[in-house]
Amino acid sequence: MDIQVRVWRQSGPEDKGRMVTYDVKDISPDASFLEMLDVLNEKLILDGDDPVAFDHDCREGICGMCGMMINGVAHGPERATTTCQLHMRHFKDGDTIDVEPWRASAFPVIKDLVVNRGAFDRIIAAGGYITAPTGTAPDAHATPVPKPDADAAFEAATCIGCGACVAACPNGSSMLFTAAKVAHLGLLPQGQPERDSRVVDMLEAQDEAGFGGCTNMGECTTVCPKGIPLSLIGRLNNDYRKAIGKR
Amino acid sequence: MAVSGLLLVGFLAMHMLGNLKIFFGADSFNHYAHWLRTVGVPLLPEGWFLWIQRFALTAAVIAHIAAATVLARRARRARPVRYVHRPKVQGSYAARTMRWGGVIILLFVIYHILDLTTGTLNPVADPEHPYRNVVADFAPGRWYVTLFYTLAVVSVGFHLRHGLFSAARTLGQRTPRGERLVRAAALVLSVALVAGYLSVPFAVLTGLVD
């Protein structure tokens, strides 16, 4: 199939950037979106042009590296799918596809479609961990965890930190990401000692990074490749209210 | 945002119940309006309860607008470069129109106070007979007043549909089952309030109340 892509080209953080149109011909409908970009880049390199920079790693939908706005939707039109798992058969022959990087002041563009998501690392560093003695691994049954809690914690833990929630949020808020991390640890017995300080510190780090405030629109859940539920934000708010009450 | 909003919703519900007195006749409605001035007497001097309520509501409105302004400004700062291609947000119409809907509601509240509290914009403006003021207000010849009133009340309905759910979420509502319940309750309450508020002008318009 033949398509046209309009890609955001920005040579560096200081460049103003612009949309550039490219024709991509003879793409297999079974190619992934990233493979289509690979084909485009090979052509650009042969032509002596600068290839389009984009993030990717596992290409199995589990690492959270890839991610771009495809026709204004984070990770493209397929629900619960990362960009690397999106296939060209979901587009029509002759389509023009707009590709842009995540837009958030906390995620500055490094080049083209690559953004710096270090702000997420700062949120994690503020409280997304547990205090555990290192050394030999404890016995698996040393700390009993009820099955429903384990399942709910695992659901939250599937967050791959790709940043689609921020990219899609009309407020540019990272609430779903922070909520997933807070819930994932807060639901487990190992996460209890830091439960109060975690939610307060992570929210502070989120505000400091320059993310917007949550207004419960639900865009984040809609585009989340892992389907992290919106109700986790309520869990975060609940933890936050209790933590502030104890201060 | 949530706390000030819920305070205002409480007022809306009481205000609507008061409005419905109009269906019990002019005496009932007028008596209710005068009674509002004597609430709390003799513990409070006459009219004090009303003024305390007005101050509390004004404070809630200011807090609500201040919180909304902070959120809107933070949202703007969080995304300085806009998307070139951005389809409509997938969230509900109610969620998308919270900010502009709020502005419409504020403008209406200002008009509404000038109309039926101070009487500045009311064709009758008789402080002794609020029933006559209301009936004159929604007379068929003043269809534009009814239109603006309807628009504002429907805006309130949309505002509450998302606002009530969002407030519950902000205050810690956290289960998927609870979310379904809260969303349903928000819809029912919004529809009930819109129906209650709109029943008055349309009763006047159709001659049910005159």
Image (cartoon, rainbow, N blue to C red):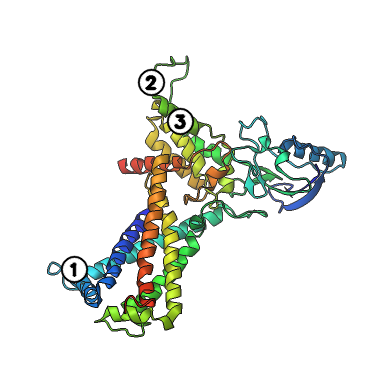
Circle 2 packing at 10 Å, graded few (<14), some (14-19), many (20+), is few
Q: Are marks 2 and 3 in contact (CB under 8 Å)?
A: no
In the rendered image, residue A101, in percent from the top left (x then y), is placed at 66, 46
Position above or below: B102 against A151: below
Say what secondary structure mark 2 lies in. loop
- Marked residue chain, label 3: A
Amino acid type, mark 3: Ala
- Marked residue chain, label 2: A
Task: Tell me the residue at 30%/66% (across/down).
Answer: B15
Task: Tell me the quarter of the image containing the C terminus of chain B.
Answer: bottom left
Q: Which residue is mark 2?
A: A144
Q: Which residue is mark 1?
A: B39
Task: Tell me the residue at 37%/42% (across/down).
Answer: A238
In the rendered image, residue A214, in percent from the top left (x then y), is placed at 48, 49
Q: Are marks 1 and 2 in contact (CB under 8 Å)?
A: no
Residue A117 found in image quarter: top right
Position above or below: A40 against B148: above
In the rendered image, residue B118, in percent from the top left (x then y), is placed at 32, 79
Q: CA distance from mark 2 to mark 3?
A: 14 Å
Judge by depth and name the residue closer to the eye, A241 or A29. A29
Circle 3 packing at 10 Å, graded few (<14), some (14-19), many (20+), is many
Task: Tell me the residue at 45%/74% (across/down).
Answer: B147
Q: Most extreme residue toward the right, as rendered?
A: A47
Residue B177 found in image quarter: top left
Residue B1 found in image quarter: bottom left
Amino acid type, mark 1: Val
Q: Which labelled disc corresponds to residue A153?
A: 3
